[in-house]
DNA sequence: GTCTATAGTCGGATAGAC
DNA sequence: GTCTATCCGACTATAGAC
């Protein structure tokens, strides 16, 4: 697997390198400012590889979005799996549903707001919501739909609320709080005089969002012993 | 003020027409996809007028952003004015602060989520948060900073909370809920099978956000008679 | 102050050698 | 499968007539 020391450098596995670089560049600049030249340069791969492997810039973009969604699925999979296994043994108790909900939101915040790569990926996701492209289908069907469905179900189980529409609205509002801190990062950074969120800030954000969520869902502070 | 019926059509007040069209086109397509040709065509003005009046595409964009911020200021000005006048007579009571807060959020939701032009403008605002350009200063200093400051102050007065940092985080989370419904519009529309928000949906959204806000801020349901 | 014509730049995709 | 060279198209901005 060692590369030739000579100049041209064949750069094997160009496909993977391109996807990696594409997530980075598209995330940083957005679809239309990012150029295939930038991406090829970052991947240290020839520009012609892009139409070759992905039949164009747009194909590469879709592949990158798909990969990002995969990363998020991966992050959430432990909790999702746990919920699945627990559900086999019968319906969740409210306090269980609540702690699953908190686990999901916590993971989301840590990844989308806190980590170094998450925020860049979050930009792509959010951008697709503002200006949906052909890649939005991937985001909707593999990420937004399952997430809103899952969260509204958990809110229902935790709160006892049953109206599905109301639950969906609550779920969107709750997820929206998480996204707000990603979107408002710029304003927060200026207004609070930070330069990006540190671990402390992420912890504070998590605390506020989880507290709001518990309250919004109508769960009293002394919950946990009730409902059984 | 009547125009010549002849072909070339001089198109007076080109400046205003350009700003009007720019808000529309930039809002619909985003800065880089929107072209000066589109805007000039929509404004029924010659392309060369753009560098002439605004010294380029970017200058026109800034002018459009500034105008949008002005429109939002205008929408909120009645409440802001009322708060200012009331504040002269002494500090606000908690229930007064709450109802001002609700008025502001309600206006925001109606305009940014519900109305026909608001959502298009909201796209520009949100986009600037994801990919700040030279126009972000305008948005931050004339809109985000005052809004977060005002809302966190009102939350403080309504809830009795005093820690400024916590209040700011709460304010961002609360505003984030409003934005969530603009961002998630696409997903909501698909997931709930609507096509755009109707008046009914806007009312539901308003109800949910205001309810969450009251609860998040820690105001009991039977509030209003307390604190005096 | 508004227009036409054009210059100058750049990005994406293709052709074809290796 | 990777590379070089090149083409084509599109966009912004400028020059200069009216």
Image: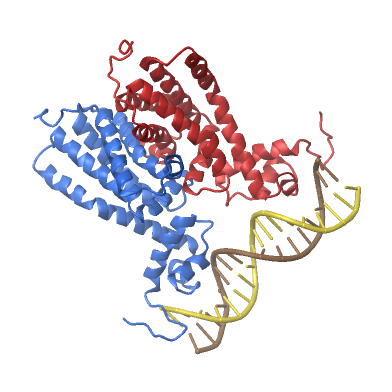
Chain colours: A red, B blue, C yellow, D brown
Residue A228's quadrant in the figure?
top left
Image location of residue A111, percent across then percent down = 50, 28
Q: Quadrant of the C terminus of chain B?
A: top left
Q: Viewer-proximal residue, A108 or A166?
A: A166
Residue A201's quadrant in the figure?
top left
Q: Viewer-proximal residue, A109 or A29?
A: A109
Q: Quadrant of the N terminus of chain B?
A: bottom left
Image location of residue B127, percent across then percent down = 45, 48
- Camera sees residue A217: yes
Residue B155's quadrant in the figure?
top left
Image location of residue A191, percent across then percent down = 36, 39
Q: Which residue sits at x=22%, y=32%? A: B156
Asked whether, in this view, residue B41 is left or right of residue A25, the answer is: left
Image location of residue B124, percent across then percent down = 42, 52
Q: Is residue B19 above or below residue B124?
A: below
Q: How many marks?
A: 0
Q: Which residue sits at x=44%, y=32%? A: A148
- Camera sees residue B142: no
Q: Is residue B163 above or below residue B25?
A: above
Asked whether, in this view, residue B195 is left or right of residue A6, the answer is: left
Q: Viewer-proximal residue, B32 or C8?
A: B32
Q: Which residue sits at x=55%, y=47%? A: A30
Q: Is residue B117 above or below residue A15?
A: below
């Amino acid at each position: 697997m060692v590369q030739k020391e000579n100049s041209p450098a064949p750069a094997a596995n160009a496909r993977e390198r391109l996807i990696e670089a594409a997530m980075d560049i598209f995330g940083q600049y957005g679809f239309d400012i990012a150029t295939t030249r930038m991406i090829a340069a970052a991947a240290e791969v020839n520009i012609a590889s892009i139409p070759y492997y992905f039949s164009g810039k747009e194909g590469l973009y879709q592949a990158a979005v798909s990969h990002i969604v995969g990363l998020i699925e991966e992050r959430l999979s432990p909790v999702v799996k746990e919920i699945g296994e627990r559900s086999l043994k019968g319906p969740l108790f409210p306090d269980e549903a609540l702690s699953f909900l908190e686990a999901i939101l916590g993971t989301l915040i840590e990844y989308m707001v806190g980590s170094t790569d998450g925020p860049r990926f979050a930009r792509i996701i959010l951008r697709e919501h503002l200006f949906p492209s052909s890649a939005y289908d991937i985001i909707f069907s593999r990420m937004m739909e399952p997430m809103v469905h899952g969260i509204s179900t958990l809110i229902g189980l935790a709160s006892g609320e049953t109206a599905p529409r109301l639950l969906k609205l609550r779920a969107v509002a709750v997820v929206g709080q998480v996204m707000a801190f990603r979107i408002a990062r710029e304003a927060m950074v200026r207004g609070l005089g930070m330069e990006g969120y540190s671990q402390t800030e992420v912890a504070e954000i998590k605390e506020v969002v989880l507290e709001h969520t518990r309250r919004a869902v109508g769960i009293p502070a002394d919950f946990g012993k009730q409902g059984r």
